[in-house]
Image (cartoon, rainbow, N blue to C red):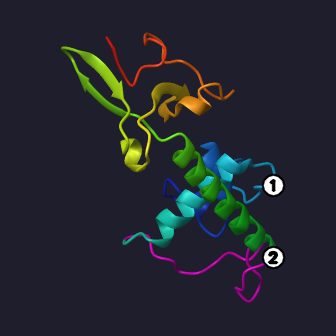
Amino acid sequence: FGAEEEYNWFAGRDASAAFVTGQFNEQGAHDDLSNFDGAQLGEVGHWLQFYNNHEVYTKVGVVEGKYFGKDGSPTAQRQQVLDAIEAERKRKEEDKRLFPPCNSRYTPETGTTFWCEPDSGGVKREWKGFVRTRDNLCVCVPPERLDHPSLGKLKGCEDDVSTCTIR
């Protein structure tokens, strides 16, 4: 983080936005999260947790600005962002409960197999589910939710199957 080091523009500033936008430069190194949607704020939360729990990157202080006052105390704006991050975490948790991830396995000989079981994605439930896509991911869907507008069919799979192999 020194003057001639690769990440020197991080030093002494809140560059939260850069971790989500990928703009790791002077223009992207800022603290304005006001236009971030829930998913982007969830990513900010991911990085916040990553650094709070990291063994090597230890906290040495806070940056006075939007999220911390002159005395280092958290601001109301920081609490608003933390509340939005928590709301996104809960939304994702509920989304995973409603549409748990499929199991998958790839081998060069057979291709990729996706399947649903009553505990696919680490979510225990009463139903097995059918293979579908949602946000470009394979999910397990119960029969009563097959017409959900956010779902698509996995290309190369038959309708209403719990197992599908794509070569």
Segment tinted magenta in the rendering: 56-75
Q: Residue furthest left?
A: 109
Q: Quadrant of residue 34?
A: bottom right
Q: Which residue corresponds to mark 2?
A: 76
Question: From what the image shows, is residue 132 above or below residue 23?
Answer: above
State yes or no: residue 58 in magenta: yes
Mark 1 Cα-neighbour bin, 10 Å: few <14, some 14–19, many ≥20? few
Circle 2: residue type: Ala
Circle 1: residue type: Ser
**Residue at (43% x, 70% y) in the render:** 57
**Residue at (56% x, 65% y) in the render:** 48
Q: Which residue corresponds to mark 1?
A: 34
Horizontal and vertical percent for residue 8?
56, 60
Kindly report the secondary structure that dominates the magenta region of the rendered protein.
Answer: loop
Horizontal and vertical percent for residue 33?
75, 55
**Residue at (39% x, 25% y) in the render:** 162
Question: From what the image shows, is residue 65 above or below residue 90?
Answer: below
Horizontal and vertical percent for residue 143?
54, 29
Horizontal and vertical percent for residue 158?
44, 11
Circle 1/circle 2 CB separation < 8 Å: no
